[in-house]
Image (cartoon, rainbow, N blue to C red):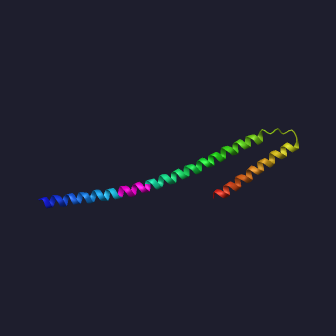
Amino acid sequence: MIHEELQHLQQLTNKVTRKLEQLELDKQALEEQVGLLQQELQEKEASLDHFKNQIKISKIVNNIPVENIASAELRNRIDNYIKEIDKIITHLSE
């Protein structure tokens, strides 16, 4: 009788141990997933900040008064610089 109870307790202990090991594996997988999602979030936030800066720069460029040809040329140059910088950032982020 005691022997049977001990065997039953040993089986239960083994089940609990296996379940605990599985939970540890699940926990590790979830921690890795959280890390990847946090990294992705940071990248998206950086992209959003870049986009916001691009909008601010575009607004500044658009607010430059076009009183003469030099101002229009300056605006076009700044726009071209912004486009080139965007291309470089996109290329570097790949």
Residue under the image location 61 percent in, 48 percent down? 46
Q: Nearer the viewer, residue 26 or 62?
A: 26
Of the 4 image quadrants, the one containing the N terminus is: bottom left
Q: How many marks?
A: 0
Residue 35 located within the stretch drawn in magenta:
no
Q: Is residue 69 left or right of residue 41?
A: right
Overall secondary structure of the magenta section: helix
Q: Position of residue 47 (x, y in %)?
A: 62, 49
Q: Is residue 57 left or right of residue 71?
A: left
Q: Which residues are magenta?
A: 22-29
Residue 25 located within the stretch drawn in magenta:
yes
Q: Position of residue 16 (x, y in %)?
A: 28, 56
Residue under the image location 39 percent in, 58 percent down? 25
Q: Position of residue 88 (x, y in %)?
A: 70, 56
Residue under the image location 33 percent in, 56 percent down? 20
Q: Nearer the viewer, residue 83 or 2?
A: 2
Of the 4 image quadrants, the one containing the C terminus is: bottom right
Single out the residue that lies furthest toward the left: 1
Report which quarter residue 3 is drawn in: bottom left
Residue under the image location 66 percent in, 43 percent down? 52
